[in-house]
Image (cartoon, grey):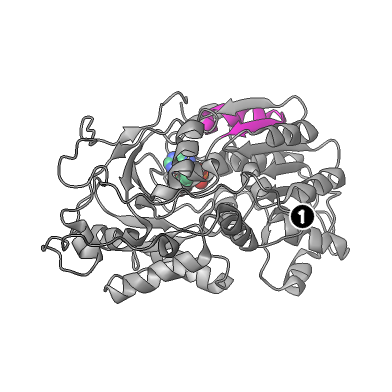
Protein backbone atom coordinates (compact mmCIF):
# COMPACT_ATOMS: atom_id res chain seq x y z
CA UNK A 1 0.00 0.00 0.00
CA UNK A 2 1.23 3.49 -0.85
CA UNK A 3 0.15 6.95 0.28
CA UNK A 4 -1.30 7.48 -3.20
CA UNK A 5 -3.60 4.47 -2.71
CA UNK A 6 -5.01 6.22 0.33
CA UNK A 7 -6.36 9.06 -1.80
CA UNK A 8 -4.10 11.90 -0.70
CA UNK A 9 -3.57 14.93 -2.94
CA UNK A 10 -0.51 15.67 -5.03
CA UNK A 11 0.91 18.48 -2.83
CA UNK A 12 0.71 16.24 0.23
CA UNK A 13 2.26 13.31 -1.65
CA UNK A 14 5.10 15.54 -2.75
CA UNK A 15 5.68 16.73 0.81
CA UNK A 16 5.81 13.09 1.95
CA UNK A 17 8.33 12.40 -0.76
CA UNK A 18 10.52 15.16 0.62
CA UNK A 19 10.18 13.64 4.10
CA UNK A 20 11.25 10.28 2.70
CA UNK A 21 8.12 8.41 3.78
CA UNK A 22 7.45 5.53 1.38
CA UNK A 23 4.89 3.37 3.09
CA UNK A 24 2.05 4.38 5.41
CA UNK A 25 2.29 3.09 8.97
CA UNK A 26 -0.64 0.90 10.12
CA UNK A 27 -2.44 3.76 11.81
CA UNK A 28 -2.01 5.93 8.72
CA UNK A 29 -3.36 3.17 6.47
CA UNK A 30 -6.39 2.73 8.70
CA UNK A 31 -7.11 6.33 9.61
CA UNK A 32 -6.47 8.34 6.45
CA UNK A 33 -9.36 7.02 4.26
CA UNK A 34 -12.16 7.58 6.81
CA UNK A 35 -10.76 10.97 7.85
CA UNK A 36 -10.69 12.02 4.19
CA UNK A 37 -14.37 11.08 4.05
CA UNK A 38 -15.06 13.43 6.93
CA UNK A 39 -15.71 10.75 9.56
CA UNK A 40 -14.90 11.25 13.23
CA UNK A 41 -12.06 9.07 14.44
CA UNK A 42 -11.01 7.44 17.66
CA UNK A 43 -7.38 6.39 17.43
CA UNK A 44 -5.85 4.26 20.13
CA UNK A 45 -2.17 4.71 19.54
CA UNK A 46 1.01 5.79 21.22
CA UNK A 47 3.40 8.33 19.83
CA UNK A 48 5.92 6.65 17.58
CA UNK A 49 3.22 5.00 15.51
CA UNK A 50 2.99 7.84 13.00
CA UNK A 51 -0.29 9.18 14.35
CA UNK A 52 0.59 12.83 13.74
CA UNK A 53 0.67 12.23 10.00
CA UNK A 54 -2.42 10.02 10.35
CA UNK A 55 -4.50 13.00 11.42
CA UNK A 56 -2.56 15.80 9.74
CA UNK A 57 -2.32 14.52 6.15
CA UNK A 58 -6.02 13.94 5.46
CA UNK A 59 -6.95 17.09 7.37
CA UNK A 60 -4.64 19.18 5.23
CA UNK A 61 -6.38 17.79 2.17
CA UNK A 62 -9.83 18.48 3.59
CA UNK A 63 -8.89 22.04 4.47
CA UNK A 64 -7.54 22.55 0.97
CA UNK A 65 -10.68 21.11 -0.60
CA UNK A 66 -13.07 23.19 1.49
CA UNK A 67 -11.09 26.29 0.57
CA UNK A 68 -12.74 28.39 3.26
CA UNK A 69 -11.21 31.72 4.25
CA UNK A 70 -9.13 32.00 7.38
CA UNK A 71 -11.56 33.14 10.08
CA UNK A 72 -10.80 36.34 12.01
CA UNK A 73 -9.34 35.54 15.47
CA UNK A 74 -10.08 31.86 14.93
CA UNK A 75 -8.74 28.80 13.15
CA UNK A 76 -9.99 26.13 10.78
CA UNK A 77 -8.21 23.22 12.41
CA UNK A 78 -7.45 23.08 16.11
CA UNK A 79 -5.02 20.51 17.52
CA UNK A 80 -4.90 20.21 21.32
CA UNK A 81 -1.81 18.68 22.88
CA UNK A 82 -0.85 18.19 26.53
CA UNK A 83 2.61 19.73 26.57
CA UNK A 84 4.60 22.50 25.00
CA UNK A 85 7.11 20.14 23.46
CA UNK A 86 4.48 18.00 21.81
CA UNK A 87 2.60 21.06 20.52
CA UNK A 88 5.78 22.50 19.00
CA UNK A 89 6.57 19.13 17.44
CA UNK A 90 3.09 18.72 15.93
CA UNK A 91 3.24 22.25 14.49
CA UNK A 92 6.62 21.48 12.92
CA UNK A 93 5.16 18.32 11.34
CA UNK A 94 2.12 20.26 10.11
CA UNK A 95 4.43 22.75 8.43
CA UNK A 96 6.40 19.95 6.79
CA UNK A 97 3.37 17.98 5.62
CA UNK A 98 1.54 21.10 4.46
CA UNK A 99 4.59 22.81 2.96
CA UNK A 100 3.10 22.75 -0.52
CA UNK A 101 -0.53 23.16 0.47
CA UNK A 102 -0.22 26.85 1.33
CA UNK A 103 -1.81 26.58 4.77
CA UNK A 104 -0.90 28.85 7.66
CA UNK A 105 0.20 27.02 10.82
CA UNK A 106 0.55 28.61 14.27
CA UNK A 107 1.39 27.21 17.69
CA UNK A 108 0.58 28.63 21.12
CA UNK A 109 1.86 27.17 24.39
CA UNK A 110 2.10 28.24 28.01
CA UNK A 111 5.28 29.79 29.35
CA UNK A 112 5.65 32.26 26.48
CA UNK A 113 4.38 35.81 25.93
CA UNK A 114 0.57 35.97 25.80
CA UNK A 115 0.78 39.30 24.00
CA UNK A 116 2.78 37.79 21.18
CA UNK A 117 0.23 34.99 20.88
CA UNK A 118 -2.58 37.51 20.82
CA UNK A 119 -0.93 39.42 17.99
CA UNK A 120 -0.09 36.40 15.92
CA UNK A 121 -3.62 35.03 16.13
CA UNK A 122 -5.38 38.31 15.44
CA UNK A 123 -5.81 37.55 11.76
CA UNK A 124 -6.61 33.91 12.41
CA UNK A 125 -4.87 30.86 11.03
CA UNK A 126 -5.64 27.68 9.10
CA UNK A 127 -4.10 25.31 11.64
CA UNK A 128 -3.56 26.07 15.30
CA UNK A 129 -1.71 23.70 17.64
CA UNK A 130 -2.28 24.64 21.27
CA UNK A 131 -2.04 23.52 24.84
CA UNK A 132 -5.49 23.78 26.46
CA UNK A 133 -4.60 26.31 29.18
CA UNK A 134 -3.05 28.90 26.89
CA UNK A 135 -5.90 28.51 24.42
CA UNK A 136 -8.49 29.22 27.12
CA UNK A 137 -6.46 32.22 28.34
CA UNK A 138 -6.74 33.77 24.91
CA UNK A 139 -10.42 32.90 24.61
CA UNK A 140 -11.11 34.44 28.04
CA UNK A 141 -9.40 37.62 26.86
CA UNK A 142 -11.56 37.68 23.73
CA UNK A 143 -8.38 37.39 21.70
CA UNK A 144 -9.49 34.17 20.08
CA UNK A 145 -12.62 32.12 19.47
CA UNK A 146 -13.40 28.65 18.22
CA UNK A 147 -16.28 29.49 15.90
CA UNK A 148 -14.27 28.74 12.75
CA UNK A 149 -13.14 25.24 13.72
CA UNK A 150 -13.83 22.67 10.99
CA UNK A 151 -11.51 19.96 12.33
CA UNK A 152 -10.71 19.37 15.98
CA UNK A 153 -7.92 17.02 17.09
CA UNK A 154 -7.28 15.89 20.64
CA UNK A 155 -3.84 14.35 20.81
CA UNK A 156 -2.70 12.26 23.78
CA UNK A 157 -6.05 12.81 25.46
CA UNK A 158 -5.15 10.52 28.36
CA UNK A 159 -2.16 12.71 29.11
CA UNK A 160 -4.30 15.81 29.03
CA UNK A 161 -6.54 14.22 31.64
CA UNK A 162 -3.53 13.27 33.75
CA UNK A 163 -2.48 16.90 33.70
CA UNK A 164 -5.87 17.92 35.01
CA UNK A 165 -7.26 19.39 31.80
CA UNK A 166 -10.65 17.69 32.03
CA UNK A 167 -12.57 20.91 32.75
CA UNK A 168 -10.65 22.76 30.05
CA UNK A 169 -11.55 20.03 27.57
CA UNK A 170 -15.23 20.15 28.52
CA UNK A 171 -15.23 23.90 28.08
CA UNK A 172 -13.54 23.70 24.69
CA UNK A 173 -16.05 21.05 23.58
CA UNK A 174 -18.88 23.51 24.26
CA UNK A 175 -17.18 26.26 22.27
CA UNK A 176 -16.47 24.44 19.00
CA UNK A 177 -19.11 24.29 16.24
CA UNK A 178 -21.34 21.20 16.37
CA UNK A 179 -20.75 20.25 12.74
CA UNK A 180 -16.97 19.96 13.07
CA UNK A 181 -15.00 16.77 12.50
CA UNK A 182 -13.30 15.35 15.61
CA UNK A 183 -10.19 13.18 15.64
CA UNK A 184 -9.48 11.83 19.08
CA UNK A 185 -6.22 10.10 20.04
CA UNK A 186 -5.23 8.40 23.23
CA UNK A 187 -2.67 5.74 24.09
CA UNK A 188 -4.92 4.26 26.75
CA UNK A 189 -8.67 4.01 27.18
CA UNK A 190 -9.58 4.41 30.83
CA UNK A 191 -13.25 5.04 31.70
CA UNK A 192 -12.91 8.80 31.84
CA UNK A 193 -11.50 8.87 28.31
CA UNK A 194 -14.41 6.80 27.04
CA UNK A 195 -16.79 9.35 28.54
CA UNK A 196 -14.86 12.17 26.94
CA UNK A 197 -14.95 10.42 23.56
CA UNK A 198 -18.72 10.10 23.68
CA UNK A 199 -18.99 13.85 24.40
CA UNK A 200 -16.70 14.78 21.56
CA UNK A 201 -17.20 12.29 18.74
CA UNK A 202 -20.15 11.24 16.62
CA UNK A 203 -20.08 7.61 15.66
CA UNK A 204 -16.31 7.55 15.32
CA UNK A 205 -14.40 5.04 13.25
CA UNK A 206 -12.15 3.26 15.72
CA UNK A 207 -8.59 2.39 14.81
CA UNK A 208 -6.17 0.80 17.20
CA UNK A 209 -2.54 0.02 16.67
CA UNK A 210 -1.74 -1.15 20.17
CA UNK A 211 -4.06 -3.02 22.46
CA UNK A 212 -5.39 -1.07 25.39
CA UNK A 213 -2.59 -0.22 27.81
CA UNK A 214 -0.16 -2.59 26.20
CA UNK A 215 3.46 -1.61 25.84
CA UNK A 216 5.15 -1.17 22.49
CA UNK A 217 5.95 -4.35 20.65
CA UNK A 218 9.56 -3.84 19.76
CA UNK A 219 10.81 -2.92 23.20
CA UNK A 220 12.84 -5.39 25.23
CA UNK A 221 12.12 -4.78 28.87
CA UNK A 222 14.61 -5.43 31.65
CA UNK A 223 14.57 -5.00 35.36
CA UNK A 224 17.15 -4.39 38.07
CA UNK A 225 16.08 -4.91 41.65
CA UNK A 226 18.24 -2.33 43.35
CA UNK A 227 18.13 -0.23 46.49
CA UNK A 228 17.36 3.47 46.26
CA UNK A 229 20.81 4.46 47.46
CA UNK A 230 22.42 2.19 44.87
CA UNK A 231 20.61 3.53 41.83
CA UNK A 232 23.01 6.34 41.05
CA UNK A 233 26.04 4.02 41.15
CA UNK A 234 24.27 1.51 38.94
CA UNK A 235 23.36 4.24 36.48
CA UNK A 236 26.93 5.50 36.35
CA UNK A 237 28.29 2.01 35.80
CA UNK A 238 25.86 1.46 32.94
CA UNK A 239 26.38 4.85 31.31
CA UNK A 240 30.15 4.61 31.56
CA UNK A 241 29.98 1.18 29.94
CA UNK A 242 31.51 -0.56 32.95
CA UNK A 243 28.38 -2.61 33.42
CA UNK A 244 27.03 -3.89 30.15
CA UNK A 245 23.32 -3.89 29.46
CA UNK A 246 21.59 -5.32 26.39
CA UNK A 247 21.16 -3.22 23.28
CA UNK A 248 23.38 -1.06 21.17
CA UNK A 249 23.71 2.32 22.77
CA UNK A 250 22.67 5.51 21.03
CA UNK A 251 20.76 8.09 23.04
CA UNK A 252 19.66 7.33 26.57
CA UNK A 253 16.58 8.84 28.15
CA UNK A 254 16.35 8.54 31.93
CA UNK A 255 13.14 9.12 33.85
CA UNK A 256 12.81 10.34 37.41
CA UNK A 257 9.54 11.01 39.21
CA UNK A 258 10.40 14.54 40.30
CA UNK A 259 12.20 17.52 38.86
CA UNK A 260 14.53 17.69 41.87
CA UNK A 261 15.33 14.03 41.31
CA UNK A 262 16.21 14.81 37.69
CA UNK A 263 18.53 17.66 38.70
CA UNK A 264 20.17 15.49 41.34
CA UNK A 265 20.91 12.72 38.87
CA UNK A 266 22.40 15.15 36.34
CA UNK A 267 24.58 16.79 39.00
CA UNK A 268 25.94 13.47 40.20
CA UNK A 269 26.52 12.24 36.66
CA UNK A 270 28.46 15.39 35.93
CA UNK A 271 30.62 14.77 39.03
CA UNK A 272 31.30 11.32 37.62
CA UNK A 273 32.36 12.90 34.31
CA UNK A 274 29.22 11.92 32.42
CA UNK A 275 27.57 14.74 30.49
CA UNK A 276 23.79 14.89 30.70
CA UNK A 277 21.01 17.47 30.59
CA UNK A 278 17.79 17.64 32.56
CA UNK A 279 14.42 18.58 31.18
CA UNK A 280 11.52 19.40 33.49
CA UNK A 281 8.93 22.01 34.35
CA UNK A 282 11.29 24.21 36.38
CA UNK A 283 13.43 24.84 33.35
CA UNK A 284 12.59 27.73 31.05
CA UNK A 285 11.14 26.96 27.65
CA UNK A 286 14.49 27.96 26.12
CA UNK A 287 16.43 25.59 28.40
CA UNK A 288 14.03 22.76 27.63
CA UNK A 289 14.27 23.31 23.92
CA UNK A 290 18.08 23.54 24.08
CA UNK A 291 18.33 20.30 26.04
CA UNK A 292 16.06 18.60 23.51
CA UNK A 293 18.04 19.99 20.58
CA UNK A 294 21.34 18.76 22.08
CA UNK A 295 19.79 15.37 22.68
CA UNK A 296 18.34 15.23 19.19
CA UNK A 297 21.66 16.17 17.58
CA UNK A 298 23.50 13.69 19.81
CA UNK A 299 25.76 16.37 21.32
CA UNK A 300 24.56 15.43 24.79
CA UNK A 301 23.30 11.92 24.32
CA UNK A 302 21.93 11.51 27.86
CA UNK A 303 18.76 13.28 28.92
CA UNK A 304 17.16 13.04 32.35
CA UNK A 305 13.49 13.91 32.27
CA UNK A 306 10.31 13.98 34.26
CA UNK A 307 7.18 12.48 32.78
CA UNK A 308 5.49 15.73 31.97
CA UNK A 309 8.46 17.31 30.25
CA UNK A 310 9.24 14.29 28.10
CA UNK A 311 5.67 13.52 27.13
CA UNK A 312 5.18 13.02 23.46
CA UNK A 313 8.70 13.99 22.48
CA UNK A 314 9.82 12.27 19.36
CA UNK A 315 13.53 11.63 19.04
CA UNK A 316 14.25 8.72 16.73
CA UNK A 317 17.66 7.76 18.14
CA UNK A 318 16.60 6.83 21.68
CA UNK A 319 18.05 3.35 22.13
CA UNK A 320 17.48 3.03 25.88
CA UNK A 321 14.90 4.31 28.30
CA UNK A 322 15.98 3.93 31.91
CA UNK A 323 13.28 4.18 34.53
CA UNK A 324 15.49 5.41 37.34
CA UNK A 325 12.37 5.65 39.43
CA UNK A 326 9.26 3.73 38.53
CA UNK A 327 6.20 5.79 37.71
CA UNK A 328 3.42 5.60 40.28
CA UNK A 329 0.81 5.67 37.50
CA UNK A 330 1.19 2.51 35.39
CA UNK A 331 0.01 4.12 32.14
CA UNK A 332 2.96 6.46 32.51
CA UNK A 333 5.26 3.51 32.04
CA UNK A 334 3.77 2.94 28.59
CA UNK A 335 4.44 6.54 27.66
CA UNK A 336 7.96 6.49 29.01
CA UNK A 337 9.15 3.41 27.21
CA UNK A 338 7.37 4.57 24.06
CA UNK A 339 10.16 7.14 23.69
CA UNK A 340 12.34 4.32 22.38
CA UNK A 341 11.68 1.91 19.48
CA UNK A 342 10.48 4.77 17.32
CA UNK A 343 10.08 4.78 13.56
CA UNK A 344 10.36 1.02 13.27
CA UNK A 345 13.49 0.50 15.36
CA UNK A 346 14.00 -1.74 18.35
CA UNK A 347 14.44 -0.34 21.80
CA UNK A 348 15.47 -1.28 25.31
CA UNK A 349 13.68 -0.26 28.48
CA UNK A 350 15.40 -0.78 31.82
CA UNK A 351 13.58 -0.38 35.11
CA UNK A 352 15.35 0.25 38.42
CA UNK A 353 13.02 -1.04 41.10
CA UNK A 354 13.70 -0.56 44.81
CA UNK A 355 11.96 -2.58 47.48
CA UNK A 356 9.52 0.23 48.19
CA UNK A 357 8.59 0.49 44.50
CA UNK A 358 7.44 -3.11 44.23
CA UNK A 359 3.81 -2.02 44.41
CA UNK A 360 4.35 0.21 41.36
CA UNK A 361 6.05 -2.64 39.53
CA UNK A 362 3.11 -4.88 40.27
CA UNK A 363 0.71 -2.26 38.93
CA UNK A 364 2.78 -1.87 35.78
CA UNK A 365 2.84 -5.61 35.22
CA UNK A 366 -0.89 -5.89 35.78
CA UNK A 367 -1.88 -2.94 33.64
CA UNK A 368 0.50 -3.36 30.73
CA UNK A 369 1.21 -7.10 30.63
CA UNK A 370 4.88 -6.12 30.65
CA UNK A 371 7.15 -9.11 30.94
CA UNK A 372 10.51 -8.11 32.36
CA UNK A 373 13.76 -9.98 32.17
CA UNK A 374 15.63 -9.62 35.42
CA UNK A 375 19.25 -8.43 35.10
CA UNK A 376 22.00 -9.14 37.60
CA UNK A 377 23.67 -6.31 39.46
CA UNK A 378 27.41 -5.82 38.88
CA UNK A 379 29.85 -7.95 40.85
CA UNK A 380 30.85 -6.48 44.19
CA UNK A 381 28.26 -3.84 43.60
CA UNK A 382 27.72 -2.93 47.22
CA UNK A 383 31.44 -2.24 47.56
CA UNK A 384 31.25 0.20 44.65
CA UNK A 385 28.27 1.95 46.20
CA UNK A 386 30.02 2.32 49.53
CA UNK A 387 33.16 3.61 47.84
CA UNK A 388 35.22 0.68 49.07
CA UNK A 389 36.46 0.18 45.54
CA UNK A 390 35.19 -1.51 42.44
CA UNK A 391 36.93 -4.80 43.00
CA UNK A 392 37.12 -5.21 46.74
CA UNK A 393 34.30 -7.02 48.45
CA UNK A 394 32.19 -5.12 50.94
CA UNK A 395 33.52 -5.35 54.50
CA UNK A 396 31.95 -8.01 56.62
CA UNK A 397 28.80 -6.88 58.32
CA UNK A 398 28.65 -3.70 56.30
CA UNK A 399 25.44 -2.04 57.31
CA UNK A 400 22.87 -0.90 54.88
CA UNK A 401 21.87 2.72 54.59
CA UNK A 402 19.11 3.52 57.00
CA UNK A 403 15.56 3.23 55.81
CA UNK A 404 14.86 6.90 56.40
CA UNK A 405 17.58 8.03 54.07
CA UNK A 406 16.57 5.87 51.16
CA UNK A 407 12.81 6.09 51.29
CA UNK A 408 11.51 7.97 48.23
CA UNK A 409 8.88 10.62 48.48
CA UNK A 410 5.39 9.27 48.96
CA UNK A 411 3.54 8.72 45.71
CA UNK A 412 0.99 11.49 46.28
CA UNK A 413 3.68 14.07 46.91
CA UNK A 414 5.63 13.11 43.83
CA UNK A 415 2.49 13.19 41.78
CA UNK A 416 1.62 16.64 43.05
CA UNK A 417 5.09 17.85 42.23
CA UNK A 418 4.85 16.39 38.74
CA UNK A 419 1.52 18.05 38.20
CA UNK A 420 3.03 21.36 39.13
CA UNK A 421 5.31 20.89 36.17
CA UNK A 422 2.39 20.90 33.78
CA UNK A 423 2.52 24.05 31.77
CA UNK A 424 -0.93 25.11 32.85
CA UNK A 425 -2.86 24.31 35.96
CA UNK A 426 -6.24 25.70 35.15
CA UNK A 427 -8.29 22.69 35.93
CA UNK A 428 -8.36 20.85 39.19
CA UNK A 429 -5.88 17.98 38.90
CA UNK A 430 -7.16 14.53 39.56
CA UNK A 431 -5.47 11.93 41.69
CA UNK A 432 -5.36 8.92 39.44
CA UNK A 433 -4.02 6.52 42.01
CA UNK A 434 -4.25 7.03 45.72
CA UNK A 435 -0.92 7.43 47.44
CA UNK A 436 0.57 4.06 48.24
CA UNK A 437 2.61 3.30 51.21
CA UNK A 438 6.19 2.38 50.39
CA UNK A 439 7.28 -0.95 51.76
CA UNK A 440 10.28 -1.01 54.01
CA UNK A 441 13.60 -2.08 52.55
CA UNK A 442 14.55 -5.55 53.55
CA UNK A 443 18.11 -6.29 54.42
CA UNK A 444 17.97 -9.89 53.34
CA UNK A 445 20.01 -11.27 50.46
CA UNK A 446 19.47 -9.40 47.26
CA UNK A 447 17.72 -11.25 44.52
CA UNK A 448 19.45 -11.47 41.22
CA UNK A 449 22.78 -10.21 42.54
CA UNK A 450 25.97 -11.62 41.12
CA UNK A 451 26.51 -13.48 37.91
CA UNK A 452 24.02 -16.10 36.97
CA UNK A 453 21.77 -15.39 39.96
CA UNK A 454 19.13 -18.03 40.50
CA UNK A 455 16.34 -15.74 39.36
CA UNK A 456 17.96 -14.69 36.19
CA UNK A 457 15.94 -15.54 33.14
CA UNK A 458 17.02 -15.52 29.54
CA UNK A 459 15.04 -15.85 26.43
CA UNK A 460 16.74 -15.78 23.09
CA UNK A 461 19.09 -13.03 24.21
CA UNK A 462 16.28 -10.49 24.27
CA UNK A 463 14.32 -9.05 27.13
CA UNK A 464 10.73 -9.83 27.74
CA UNK A 465 8.62 -8.29 25.11
CA UNK A 466 5.09 -7.21 25.66
CA UNK A 467 2.43 -9.21 23.93
CA UNK A 468 2.02 -8.09 20.36
CA UNK A 469 -1.63 -8.14 19.57
CA UNK A 470 -1.65 -4.84 17.70
CA UNK A 471 -2.09 -4.59 14.01
P1 LIG B 1 4.46 10.14 15.61
O1 LIG B 1 3.86 8.88 16.13
O2 LIG B 1 3.48 10.95 14.83
O3 LIG B 1 5.12 10.93 16.70
O4 LIG B 1 5.62 9.75 14.55
C1 LIG B 1 6.73 9.00 14.92
C2 LIG B 1 7.89 9.14 13.94
O5 LIG B 1 7.66 8.39 12.77
C3 LIG B 1 8.17 10.56 13.47
O6 LIG B 1 9.57 10.75 13.53
C4 LIG B 1 7.68 10.61 12.07
O7 LIG B 1 8.42 11.54 11.30
C5 LIG B 1 7.91 9.18 11.61
N1 LIG B 1 6.95 8.73 10.59
C6 LIG B 1 5.62 8.93 10.59
N2 LIG B 1 5.06 8.32 9.53
C7 LIG B 1 6.05 7.72 8.84
C8 LIG B 1 6.11 6.93 7.63
N3 LIG B 1 5.00 6.62 6.96
N4 LIG B 1 7.31 6.49 7.23
C9 LIG B 1 8.43 6.78 7.92
N5 LIG B 1 8.46 7.52 9.06
C10 LIG B 1 7.28 7.98 9.52
Image quarter for residue 182? top right
Which residue lies most toward the left here? 391
Image quarter for residue 276? bottom left
Q: What count of labels does the image hold?
A: 1
> Does 91 appear above or below 67?
below
Left or right of 182 in this view: 374: left
* In front of the other: 326 or 143: 326
What's the magenta region?
27-44
Q: Position of residue 169 (x, y in %)?
A: 77, 47
Left or right of 468 in this view: 409: right
Mark 1 is surrounded, within 10 Å at the Cα level, by few (under 14), some (14 to 19) or many (20 or more) other residues, namely some
Q: Is residue 319 rendered magenta in the image?
A: no
Name the element at disc 1.
loop
Q: Position of residue 308 (x, y in %)?
A: 56, 56
Which residue lies most toward the right here? 142
Q: Residue at x 80, y 34 (%)?
A: 199
* In front of the other: 306 or 139: 306
Which residue is tagged 1? 427
Image quarter for residue 383? bottom left
Q: Residue at x 40, y 57 (%)?
A: 254
Q: Is residue 32 rendered magenta in the image?
A: yes
Which residue lies most toward the bottom here? 271
Residue 174 seen in the current view: yes
> Does 315 appear above or below 271?
above
Residue 17 seen in the current view: no
> Does 273 appear above or below 393?
below
* In front of the other: 20 or 215: 215
Amino acid sequence: MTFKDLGLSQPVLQALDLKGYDVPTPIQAQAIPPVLEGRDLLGIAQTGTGKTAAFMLPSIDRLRDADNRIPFKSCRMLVLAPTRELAVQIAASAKDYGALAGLKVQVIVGGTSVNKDRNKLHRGTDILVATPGRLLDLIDQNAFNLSGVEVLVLDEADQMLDLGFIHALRKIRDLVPKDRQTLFFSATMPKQIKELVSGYCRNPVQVSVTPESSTAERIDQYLFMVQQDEKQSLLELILSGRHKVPGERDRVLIFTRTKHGADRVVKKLSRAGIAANAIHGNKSQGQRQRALDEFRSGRTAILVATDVAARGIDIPGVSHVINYELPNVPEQYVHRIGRTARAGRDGVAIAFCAEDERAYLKDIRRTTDADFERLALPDNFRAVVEGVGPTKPAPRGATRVSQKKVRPKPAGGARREERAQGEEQRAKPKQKHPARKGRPNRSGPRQGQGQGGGNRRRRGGGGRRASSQGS
